[in-house]
Amino acid sequence: MGRLIVAANRLPISVGKREGRFHFRQSPGGLAVGLASLPETLERLWLGWPGISSERLKPDEKEHLRAELKQQHSAPVFLSQRQIDQYYLGFCNKTIWPLFHYFPVRTVFEQRFWKSYQQVNHLFCEEVLKIAQPSDSVWIHDFQLMLLPRLLREKMPELSIGYFHHIPWPSFELFRLLPSREEVLEGLLGADLIGFHSYDYVRHFLSSVSRIAGLEHMLGQVNVHNRIAKVDAFPMGIDYERYAGAIGNAEVKKEVDRIYKIVGKRQIIVSVDRLDYTKGIVERLEAFDWFLSTHPEYKEKVTLIIVAVPSRSGIEDYKQLRSHLEELVGRVNGEHGTIGYMPVWYLYRLLPFAKLTALYNAADVALITPLRDGMNLIAKEFVATKTDGRGVLILSEMTGAASELGESLIVNANDKAAIVEAIREALEMPVGEQRERNRSMQERLQRYAIERWSTDFVHALSEIKAKQEDVSVHKLSASAQDTLKQTYEAGDKRLLLLDYDGTLVGFKGRPAQAGPDAEIKAILEALADDARNTLTVISGRDKDTLDNWLGTLDIQLIAEHGGWIRQRGGDWRSFQPISQEWKATIRPILDLYSDRTPGSHVEEKDFSLVWHYRRAEPALADVRTHELRDALVNMTGNMDVGVFEGSKILEVRKHGINKGRAAEYLMERENWDFLLAIGDDYTDEEMFAAMPETAYSIKVGSSISKARFNVDTVQNVRNLLKKLAE
């Protein structure tokens, strides 16, 4: 593995310019800490916007800035003020942010924002390509750069690319509102590994992949144009030891004593968040107001300290939010306060580490109730500081952290009555119970700290690349094709077994063409003209269709996966007697599910019944498939038929009818010098399994197969057959 190139909207270093001089300020966050914890042997380079618009920089200043940042293992991406306004403040913060946080009414769809977003992602791509080597890995972060993975993949296909999404991924119903939804998915699927904070977000993303991009997935793996992409959850942790050890710092102790001196014996509830409408700050303050109104005995006994960190202060929505929050603070204090008692302390600022951890340590309760949040590290920080075990976390179920901090008091952030009850329960919880809850959460947070998050992701990226390379080992390379051609030319008796749909025509996952085109007919004719070849098309199609399409060629035809065979110049004959009795039992239930699943239909063949659902709505089809499969398995237990699941089909077929049996029948008839079998579907695996080790078996696609080799597309198959026919 080469270097790790980190691409993020912002550098971990903020650059300012005052009186013609540059000023550098470290802005370490969880991401910077996580990357710092990676092995020192892994060279790292961070690429992002330095925080200053390009209009404020002369050409020589840009070069000076590049040189300065290079010393700190960073590289700048310069953005104009227009790009900042339209890409960042526009598309990122007015389109993606509200939509992905379930605020569609706040979402703004403007074409100029989208165009700027595309432009900036292309700009990041250009900057990465200036420094990237094929052996490097690129780790792209967050929603500002969702197009970048595909852009890099197109320019440097061998690059190892990871992407991590730090905010929620919305349900399909919300994501489909985005006009550029296809482009965003295509952009992200350029990555080898796509990470989210929780499995809920993974599930939503895969649903979008299935229903919008039309790609299938299994166990978190998506087949993207015959390249495997992995989607998984990597819950981000914190620097646990730093927060757990903060109370040992003299400055923190001093600050804790100062807080206790001011507050006295009152219990403290702390609320720390960026000032954002997704954080539910107004809603929790309203709940606290309700708590004091319904539990007046707590007046003068509890204080809520709200720390609202300034965020996006240039956006009108945020200005209005601040104004509304400050008015509400004044009203609550006016209604419930007395001389010497202020129920709510409100701080609009970013607290330094010592003051923040002192506040965590002093607090009896943390009230963290975002309306929607990707992870929420504040909740984890609060729990980590509670080394004496005292303290209660009230946490919204809408955060990624809720799946890890199940011992906290989990609430629906929209249910103010539930928040009121949780506040009461937290304030009255016995210390023993507090310690037991916190102990479990602390052990979990300590195990999965920030360094574990970053190392797990990098390791998973290496694993998926290794899996891709393992698949590529089985690719039919140019040298392997040459060897195949030599073996073919040396053979006097050759058997060629070729699947039809997805192998000779059409593409995997899409309907095949309505019959063979001129190119494939010419290829088959050329192969059939060689007297040394016994060319066989072995398909799941019915015999009448194969007769209509290929009956004029001097080749063997096998229909219905081996149910029927027509040898050259002969008539169709079946491998087994045709039995229709079982269909009378099975057909009605298939028809019922077809009626209940718009877009699906039933196909009847001599030896099978097939339920097709490719055109059905994916989510409904997924449910119906599970129901129907279970019903069919139960019904067919005492019948001489089996239930088989393929690409967007469920098939009920007579036992003993399969391509493997048909292939064995043909192989036994001659002592073949050369054997070739090519297919793309699950039904072809039986054929591959029947092949001897010396045979050339080829799977179209990159999925795991019993075939010796893989090729990517139908066109690859055609090119190979052309080469043999020369």
Image (spheres, rainbow, N blue to C red):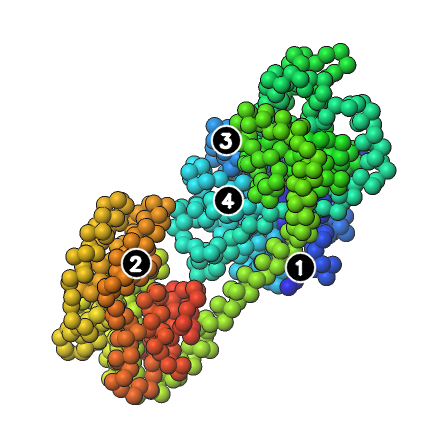
Residue 152 screen position, x and y as percent: 55, 54
Residue 346 screen position, x and y as percent: 70, 23
**Tags 3 and 1 in contact by the CB under 8 Å rule?**
no
Q: Is residue 590 above or below residue 2?
A: above
Residue positioned most to the left? 571
| Alpha carbon separation for disc pair 1 and 4 | 32 Å
- The answer to whether 669 appears left or right of 124 in the picture is left
* Sequence-first tag of 1 and 2: 1
- Dot 3 lies on which element? loop
**Tags 1 and 2 in contact by the CB under 8 Å rule?**
no
Q: Quadrant of residue 388?
A: top right
Q: Residue at x 78, y 44 (%)?
A: 245
Pointer 3: what residue? 103
Q: Nearer the viewer, residue 435 or 115?
A: 435
Q: In the image, what residue type sits under mark 1? A: Arg
Pointer 1: what residue? 3
| Alpha carbon separation for disc pair 3 and 2 | 44 Å
- Dot 4 lies on which element? helix
| Alpha carbon separation for disc pair 1 and 2 | 52 Å
Pointer 2: what residue? 633
| Alpha carbon separation for disc pair 2 and 4 | 31 Å
- The answer to whether 201 appears left or right of 291 in the picture is left
Q: In the image, what residue type sits under mark 3? A: Phe
Q: Residue at x 58, y 58 (%)?
A: 461
Q: Residues within 10 Å of mark 3 (few under 14, many from 20)?
A: some
* Sequence-first tag of 3 and 1: 1
| Alpha carbon separation for disc pair 4 and 3 | 18 Å
* Sequence-first tag of 3 and 2: 3
Pointer 4: what residue? 200
